[in-house]
Image (cartoon, coloured by chain):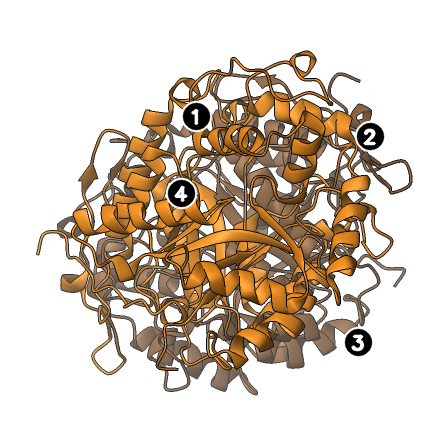
Chain colours: A orange, B brown
Amino acid sequence: MAFRQLHLNAFLMTVGHHEAAWRLPESDPFAHVDVRHYIELAQIAERGKLDSLFLADSPVLWNSVGRRPAGGLEPTVLLAALATATSRIGLIATASTTYNEPYNIARRFASIDHISGGRAGWNVVTTAQLDAARNFNLASLPSHRDRYERAAEFIDVTRKLWDSWEDDAPVGDKEAGVWGDDAKLHPPGHSGRFFQVAGALDVPRSPQGHPLLVQAGSSADGKELAARHADAVFTAQQTLAEAQEFYADLKRRALTEGRDPEAIKILPGIVPAIGATEKEAKDLEEELDRLIKPEYALKQLADTLHLSPADLHLDRPLPADLPPEAEIEGAKSRYTLIVDLARRENLTVRQLIGRLGGGRGHRTFAGTPEQVADAIQHWFENGAADGFNIMAPVLPSGLERFVDQVVPILQQRGLFRTGYTGSTLREHYGLARPAAVLEGA
Amino acid sequence: MAFRQLHLNAFLMTVGHHEAAWRLPESDPFAHVDVRHYIELAQIAERGKLDSLFLADSPVLWNSVGRRPAGGLEPTVLLAALATATSRIGLIATASTTYNEPYNIARRFASIDHISGGRAGWNVVTTAQLDAARNFNLASLPSHRDRYERAAEFIDVTRKLWDSWEDDAPVGDKEAGVWGDDAKLHPPGHSGRFFQVAGALDVPRSPQGHPLLVQAGSSADGKELAARHADAVFTAQQTLAEAQEFYADLKRRALTEGRDPEAIKILPGIVPAIGATEKEAKDLEEELDRLIKPEYALKQLADTLHLSPADLHLDRPLPADLPPEAEIEGAKSRYTLIVDLARRENLTVRQLIGRLGGGRGHRTFAGTPEQVADAIQHWFENGAADGFNIMAPVLPSGLERFVDQVVPILQQRGLFRTGYTGSTLREHYGLARPAAVLEGA
């Protein structure tokens, strides 16, 4: 394993990333509230020696539950349940910095890190939906800038809390009757624009010191946050050129922040439809696209573009006069990605809906296991990726195919581990365990 | 099983409820951050057919970590980990209404209810410590009255969220491409003094409808909250007379609120030191008391009584001029219990510290398995309890003794189940599954 190695994450979502996956005969439409479904997926991913699995999240229910499996299991408690059903794979869950408090989040992830023996990761999101704000006492969405400033301070406080116990603060001296050393506690005493947090965390320092920090926003503010703080970045990139540009930009930003560019791992998403032949793969993709009901998708596309559904016509291109990204308060980078994709490939709204239904802006790819491995290797070896975020269109079958058919090819090519060599998520990603930065020291 | 049956809850805390338990040769002083310890305890309790297990919580680290095992695993994520390691026992965790948002709490407990197949319970606390407030952007502790008003509204919103999906809102009609029925969603649209929560929960209605609600504050406000909302109440009662008075008062209050008094189960705590002979039990109790270091306990007692440690003398009774409960902003009922215990038994501060170190105000009892069973039966049959909150002084050994030696006696006497008859926590406690109260219906 002397060569540079790929990092692979399994992004788990209901019965698959394709919005119509639940309509396939093989799918259980209620699996997304059944922990056994997620345990099965986690164990498949671990069998494939993947670095980690990942759960997305927004604390909000979409407008309609007609379209596809809605609601689900809150990711931090689901992650804890998966921790005891697995032993090696990393476990990453999303939590919002806009609708939580740092003390609660620091506790939960430090606790999951203990429970999993050092396998926890936190995907930091600022939560772009107005409807989420309205579940948390707010009448309007805080501005993009405010959400990112709060996120930066939130991460700062969370790290102070994770460092508020030195590793050897617990002593356990039964004879002397001294359990811990108070001199090795460092309460943050934090007082900032958004947060005042006085005391030390009520969790001893965890196996990884800091659970892995993941970031997935690709706006300018998102990239800035990632460059400063993230250990890993999930990103949606449609073309090699775009992915290369994003990769180089983020590594350069990390360097500017005084960080080793190797210490930030960049994983574009890929939605692989895998078949024994190329035709079989494309047939699966077409079957799924055929099962999309355009009326739901049209409404969502209109919302994302800040339009009304009446502004969109299924068999015409997007309207010409869309506002620039700077005027968008929601998910900025997703907005631009969708507009660029439609314009670049001159897609009708119907075609665009098909592409988005397959991967919500992530790159879709239909092919044989060899072709999928080639696609991964090509980006990996051409400055576009440190690894991939695997978004199976159908779950569990799509993840099983990836693990059983694509992973062995990547292993044969010397690109991917044949067994876990570390025991923590940081070790899987080749990242050091951070030493505690001591407040008041 | 025609007779009235006991309900038994295992209150799990580090390596035991006695503050010096960690100093015994058998104890692992770091077990409280090891999920395997809690899995072992949960499985022991389940072997004993106990109704439930329970995890306490405050989002704060005590002033000193010298005294005993400090910090721990956040209870909601720990509960989820225990859900997959057990199959029948109920799972209750504490969460604060003062330092959380209803949408987050409703989601987590509904998710745990799904993950556990209907075994989740939430112990509602308002969190009395100033040091907790200072971890959540506050300079001072909100008043007792404000905390309880917020708690009442918090529970109201949480129930609206749990009822925001009708049970049959998920449809899963693959053929028609309709996953759920939007007409069966009921967004709370709640706007109150403390909370504005617009949308439906992003978790389908859970197996129990509402996870069990537990309450453990015994102040007037606490009893009022319990009478209105609680399915089960944990309480600290030192004498039969006090326990009878509390029991009758709470059942009466429930009736006044228009509830069936049978629908609120009252479980006093008991800290049983169990030995093959009475002498063996008392020796264990004495060994534990001998291991208490009074300097820590003196500080804590002084804090609870709103005094300085210098006001207390180990070999004298409490000062005569303590303030009445009405002037206390913290844990009111705990304050009164401690003062009453010291005065009633004319204890010196040193003796009082021994009693509190064993059970933090809960009833301690040393005896043979027969004697412990007698003590339980006596209160159960004399209007003082619907069951007991079992607080083993040492864990796991104290819980093992209770399960293997006391439970069989209670079973032989026809007082306790010999096997689980239901599959949900509500069924264990003999409580109905609540129908959804529909907003806007």
Please determine whether, in this image, residue A165 is positioned above or below residue B49.
above
Residue B192 screen position, x and y as percent: 54, 17
| Residue wearing tag 2 | B181
Q: What chain does badge 3 belong to?
A: B
- For the residues carrying marks 4 and 1, which lies nearer the camera in this image? 1
Q: For the residue marked with disc 1, what is the amino acid?
A: Arg
Taking the spot 74% from the left edge, 50% from the top edge, the residue there is: A285
Q: Which element is circle 1 on?
A: helix
Is B406 or A331 nearer to us in this picture? A331
| Residues at marks 3 and 4 on the same chain | yes
| Residue wearing tag 3 | B412
Q: Which element is circle 3 on?
A: helix
Q: Residue furthest left?
A: A441
Residue B300 falls left or right of residue A406: left
- The answer to whether residue A230 is seen in the rendering is yes
Q: Earlier in the sequence, mark 3 or mark 4?
A: 4
Q: What chain does badge 4 belong to?
A: B
Q: What chain does badge 1 belong to?
A: B
Taking the spot 25% from the left edge, 43% from the top edge, the residue there is: B320
| Residue wearing tag 1 | B145
Q: Earlier in the sequence, mark 2 or mark 3?
A: 2
Cα distance in 3D space between marks 4 and 2: 52 Å
Please determine whether, in this image, residue B231 is positioned above or below residue B326.
below
